[in-house]
Amino acid sequence: MRRRIVAGNWKMNKNFQQAEDLFDELVDLLKNGQNKDTDVIVCPPSLYIEMAHDLSCDEEDGNEVFYGVGAQNVNEHESGAYTGEISAGMLASMGVEYCIVGHSERRRYYGETDALVAQKIESLLQNDIIPIVCIGETLEERESGKAFEVIERQLEEGMFNLKPLDFVKLIIAYEPVWAIGTGKTATPEQAQEIHAHIRKCIQEKYGKAVSSTIPLLYGGSCNPKTAPELFAQEDIDGGLIGGASLQAEDFMKIVNA
Ligand code: 13P
């Protein structure tokens, strides 16, 4: 059985107080009604990682952990003169367990390439942080019939350099760029088609034992309404949630979808 995962990507939202309030609400909801079959991950802005970590478990309650803490980005170098950047070693030392890599916003606004994504993944794995690697096509690429080709290139150049023992540690998120923040969710059929293709490519490269264990998340305007049908698809193992993760109740509904 593959792990079921719902991860929230807060992106660049919330000030300190708002972040604390959201964590508090979320912990209350998770304490009382979390579907235990689903792993929950929260990826706040890096400034709030310490707070996220402190609030993620309840010491009185036998150290129950409510969610895993993830970062939204990492620098590929170990340390040095890279002003403004944060390394995987630093994240690990703050208790970070996951990190988003290759998000389309980073590819688009900060020029991140598949080669850079590969370097970041390597640095994260060396520090025992699980990469949540994002891939997905733009609207233009979809409309010109290139969705599969783009996905294959992103897998090949970003991840397929890994040895099987490292590759199995990844979580992969399919996030069609045209669905992110647009309110235009991919249909369950569209998402399943790509997810099945991703799994097939992984199977061809690493074999069935590996392809059947990698969690594949869907991301892009996923909300409490669209999540149940998406998550019911054979190759969709959960979601990477942007906007709807900023509201505790909505996020919780998606967790329990
Ligand atoms: P939205 O859910 O806001 O579309 O964002 C998805 C996303 O980019 C998650 O990483």
Image (cartoon, helix red, strand yellow):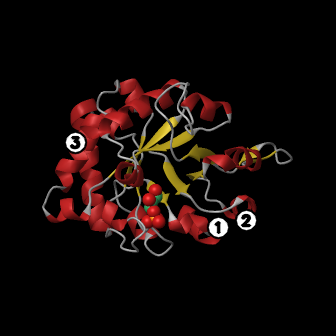
In this view, the residue in front, 82 or 113, is: 82
Q: Is residue 25 above or below residue 63?
A: below
Of badges 3 and 2, the one in the foreground is 3
* Residue 141 shown left or right of residue 83 in the figure: left
State the residue at coordinates (28%, 45%).
199
Marks 3 and 2, how far apart at CA? 40 Å
Residue neighbourhood size for the residue with mark 3, other residues' Cα within 10 Å, grouped as few (<14), some (14–19), many (≥20):
some
Q: Which element carries disc 2, helix, strand or loop? A: helix
Residue neighbourhood size for the residue with mark 1, other residues' Cα within 10 Å, grouped as few (<14), some (14–19), many (≥20):
many
Q: Residue flagged by tag 1: what amino acid is it?
A: Ala
Quadrant of image for the N terminus: top left
* Residue 35 shown left or right of residue 213 in the figure: right
Q: Quadrant holding ligand 1? A: bottom left
The residue to which callout 1 is attached is: 248
State the residue at coordinates (44%, 45%).
2
Q: Are marks 3 and 1 in contact (CB under 8 Å)?
A: no
Residue neighbourhood size for the residue with mark 2, other residues' Cα within 10 Å, grouped as few (<14), some (14–19), many (≥20):
some
Q: Residue flagged by tag 2: what amino acid is it?
A: Glu
Marks 3 and 1, how far apart at CA? 36 Å
Of badges 3 and 1, the one in the foreground is 3
The residue to which callout 3 is attached is: 153
Instruction: Give the residue furthest to the right.
Output: 60
- Report which quarter residue 252 is drawn in: bottom right
The residue to which callout 2 is attached is: 25
Q: Is residue 134 above or below residue 141?
A: above
Q: In the image, residue 153 lies at what x, y percent?
A: 22, 42
Q: In the image, residue 93 lies at what x, y percent?
A: 66, 30
* Precedes in sequence: disc 3 or disc 1: 3
Q: Which element carries disc 1, helix, strand or loop? A: helix
Q: Disc number at residue 64?
A: none
